């Protein structure tokens, strides 16, 4: 027998446990709890995790008491169960850490892509605005005034005609000419939006 292991009668305890004797279970708990917690702490970081593992060991022992006939050494059985549950916990923690790391990486990539898209969109918007202003300035003076009154000031055709003392048809002709001019000068932006 190894030093530090409790000196118990395996057959007696296993027989009592199989019969559901709580006193045998409580005795094993008192004899092994601290030792098993110390074993768990060798694998795990936190005291609370180690205690939780050992509580699970005893819970499984009680739940499986009817099938303990296969066990020949209660010491080895409890130590092995403790070690296996610790290793399972470590695997679970590693999977959880990988999941969190991957989630963070994916979230970061999405945010980076969003920021890039936003920056590109803003740049394109500023470039378009500048190009519109340049294109408007290239219009003949009367055509430019009619276009600005229609598109920038929001005036109706009849209001423009009345204000400038021209016919509706003249307003329509200047607007058609201005729109052709704008489409030509903004063709690279129009093709991007289609």
Image: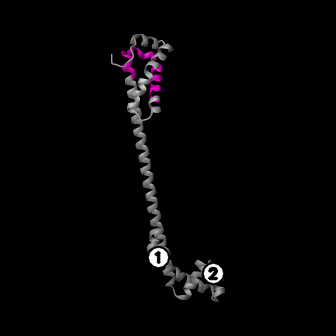
Q: Is residue 64 left or right of residue 154?
A: left
Q: Residue at x 47, y 66 (%)?
A: 121
Which residues are the magenta region? 52-78
Q: Residue at point 44% right, 47% down?
A: 103
Q: Is residue 42 magenta?
A: no
Crowdedness of circle 1 by 10 Å Cα count: few (<14), some, many (20+)?
A: some
| Residue at screen point 49% across, 17% down | 26
Q: Nearer the viewer, residue 184 or 2?
A: 2
Mark 2 vs 1: CB contact within 8 A: no
Q: How is the image coloured?
A: one colour
Residue under label 2: 157
Direction left: furthest residue:
1
* Residue 20 appears anywhere in the view: no
Where's residue 79, x and y in %?
38, 23
In front of the other: 154 or 42? 42
Q: Position of residue 80 (x, y in %)?
A: 37, 24
Residue 71 vertical position relative to residue 171 in the rendered view, above or below: above
Disc 2 secondary structure class: helix
Which residue has dot 1 on it?
186
- The 10 Å Cα crowd at callout 2, few under 14, some 14 to 19, many 20 or more, is some
Image quarter for residue 28?
top left
| Quarter-of-image position of residue 10 | top left
Position of residue 1 relative to residue 36, above or below, is above
Instruction: Give the structural element (helix, strand or loop) at label 1.
Output: loop
Q: Quadrant of residue 160?
A: bottom right
Query: What separation in Å lies between label 2 and label 1 (alpha carbons)?
Result: 24 Å
């Amino acid at each position: 027998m190894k030093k530090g292991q409790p000196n118990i009668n395996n057959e007696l305890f296993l027989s009592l446990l199989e019969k559901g004797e709580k006193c045998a279970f409580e005795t094993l708990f008192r004899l092994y709890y601290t030792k098993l917690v110390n074993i768990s702490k060798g694998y795990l970081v936190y005291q609370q995790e180690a205690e939780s593992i050992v509580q699970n060991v005893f819970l499984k022992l009680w739940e499986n008491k009817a099938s303990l006939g296969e066990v020949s050494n209660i010491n080895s059985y409890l130590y092995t169960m403790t070690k296996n549950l610790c290793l399972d916990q470590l695997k679970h923690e590693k999977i959880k850490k990988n999941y969190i790391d991957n989630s963070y990486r994916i979230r970061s990539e999405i945010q980076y892509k969003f920021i890039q898209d936003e920056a590109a969109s803003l740049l394109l918007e500023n470039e378009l605005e500048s190009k519109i202003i340049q294109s408007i300035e290239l219009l003949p003076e009367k055509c430019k005034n009619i276009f600005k009154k229609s598109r920038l000031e929001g005036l109706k055709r009849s209001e423009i005609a009345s204000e400038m003392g021209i016919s509706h048809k003249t307003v329509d002709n200047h607007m058609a000419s201005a729109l052709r001019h704008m489409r030509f000068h903004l063709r690279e932006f129009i093709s991007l939006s289609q």
